[in-house]
Amino acid sequence: TNMKVTKICCIGAGYVGGPTMAVIAQKCPDIEVTVVDLNAERIAAWNDKDINNIPIYEPGLGEIVGEARGRNLFFSTEVEKAIHEAQLIFISVNTPTKTYGSGKGMAADLKYIELCARQIARIAKDDKIVVEKSTLPVRTAEAIKSILNHTGNGVQFQILSNPEFLAEGTAVQDLLHPDRVLIGGETCEEGQKAIQTLVDIYAHWVPREKILTTNVWSSELSKLTANAFLAQRVSSINAISELCEKTGANVNEVARAIGMDSRIGPKFLKASVGFGGSCFQKDILNLVYICKSFGLVEVADYWEQVIIMNDHQKRRFGNNIVSTLYNTVADKKIAFLGWAFKKDTNDTRESAAIYIADDLVNEQANIAVYDPKVDADQVYADLDYLKTRNVEKNRKKVTVFEDPYETCHHAHAIAIMTEWDEFAAYDWQRIYDNMQKPAFVFDGRNLLDEAKLREIGFIYQSIGS
Ligand code: UDX
Ligand code: UDX
Ligand code: ADP
């Protein structure tokens, strides 16, 4: 018989753990779901009476948390208690790229994962299923298993890989209606039972035929491969965008034309200022690192090129602003509309805006930032993290506004960094009237109405035309 799950614990109340557990709790009212985190501030925010204050902005998430919280969804800092009581434990902690030692800048830093595994090993008194939910390098499950199986207290652990494919900004919809759910487990009988236990949870709302089961390594590698393929499409269209700018072709037209080939498909062909987010770069670096560690030089180089292209796309966007503004942006006001790595999220991890702002501040520009969901603290934290200059200088050269019109007031140029819907709806005549002339717009998302902006008088440049 399968294990009867009455309590689930999720370690890590972040962009993945929070929304995923909220949906599980909503769909499985008979199961008590507790999300734990070391970060007390984050847990307090999840528990805030005002549902608008939960720490993650995702359309539709507030309603689901509001419905389930206090009923069978709990947020807590009592990590040990939750581990002790649960039959099923999700590990959803962050796995940043290593910033030190061997594999620096490439390999995933597994220290948080290892700490979790050791904590589970120490606390567990009965059999448990441990599910890796974070994006992890292939073979992490094996490492977790080896830590768990040396507790010597007779407790049986089954490790499953259940990668998350949700995209930020659409997390709730992706969780409610996933293309597929992937569960990897051991091929032995115990492993198959553990897989079935997790299948039964998802089957509360996901059609069975969309729940795939594989061995652990296929599951782990599928996650890295899916993200690598998606990122590769963005880098491919961005590469073509640069050629379009030289030849008079229009990248939007090219994307449309190739996307109608059913073998290629229309999605993920939007040329942009460069992809960001916590996953694409990290996962590809991981893939590259794994390939190199097996001596697969050509395979590693192939995927690394996706990142090289993305870095180039970000850099050339900034360089183009400088060269278009008569080769100097020193003390000119450049307004950034958008700081998040994509619309409908407050997440800024690896956002192109950070790197382009950093480059422009090196050129002594004054940057004015407006993002509907990102606050000033986050903008400064992102810049300070780069350690390009001291924190005072970042505050002197970068100003964060709460009003888009103020942001653009007296600006020499506007750069669209994120494709927030509201940007297209602004009163662009009003913005134009209050800018320095000539007034430039660099549309890093091909979001605005080109004809309208030109008619108003803007010098408008988009990506790939
Ligand atoms: C291709 C394009 O598909 C077609 O649209 C264009 O007009 C001409 O070039 P073709 O070369 O006839 O057509 O065959 P295609 O089916 O695309 O296959 C090309 C090569 O890729 C073959 O050697 C095929 O075996 C190989 N291939 C294709 C794979 O190895 N794996 C695949 O998944 C698909
Ligand atoms: C991604 C995967 O889509 C998701 O399945 C996985 O679980 C996590 O990583 P996410 O990073 O949240 O999700 O967002 P995604 O929509 O994939 O966008 C990533 C970046 O690519 C963004 O900066 C986005 O603006 C950019 N992008 C995406 C483009 O520039 N052009 C496109 O056509 C698509
Ligand atoms: P993701 O996008 O993968 O969800 P986040 O950084 O948003 O990543 O969330 C990961 C969360 O995991 C953070 O809130 C962090 O505090 C938490 N965390 C990391 N290590 C531990 C641990 N050992 N125990 C509990 N929580 C942890």
Image (cartoon, grey):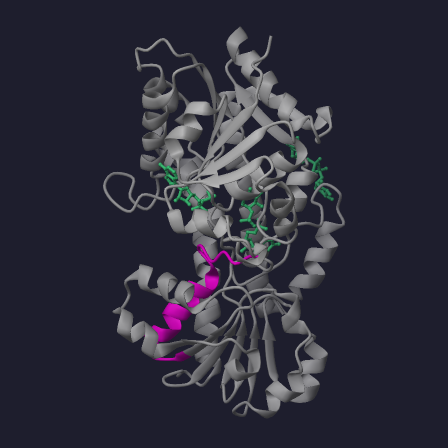
Indicate the position of residue 83 as horizontal and vertical percent values.
42, 27
- Of residues 43 and 208, the one drawn nearer to the viewer in this rendering: 43
* Residue 325 shows in this picture: yes
Q: Is residue 110 left or right of residue 86?
A: left
Query: Which residue lies at the image location 61% right of the left edge and 17% below the top edge?
Result: 196
In magenta, the rendered stretch is 345-366
Query: Which residue lies at the image location 52% right of the left edge and 58% below the top edge?
Result: 346
In the picture, which quadrant includes the C terminus? bottom right
Q: Is residue 157 left or right of residue 418?
A: left
Query: Which residue lies at the image location 52% right of the left edge and 38% below the top edge?
Result: 74
* Residue 170 shows in this picture: no
Query: Which residue lies at the image location 29% right of the left edge and 47% below the top edge?
Result: 99
Residue 358 lies in the magenta-colored region: yes
The extreme left residue here reads 101
How many numbered badges does the structure rendering display?
A: 0
Indicate the position of residue 220 as horizontal and vertical percent values.
49, 29
- Of residues 336 and 106, the one drawn nearer to the viewer in this rendering: 336
Height in image: 66 above or below 389? above
Report the image quarter containing ligand 1: top right
Indicate the position of residue 222 as horizontal and vertical percent values.
54, 31
- Of residues 181 and 314, the one drawn nearer to the viewer in this rendering: 181
Residue 115 lies in the magenta-colored region: no
In the picture, which quadrant includes the N terminus? top right
- Of residues 197 and 427, the one drawn nearer to the viewer in this rendering: 197
Indicate the position of residue 219 as horizontal and vertical percent values.
53, 26
Height in image: 15 above or below 216? below
Residue 214, image quadrant: top right
Height in image: 335 above or below 62? below
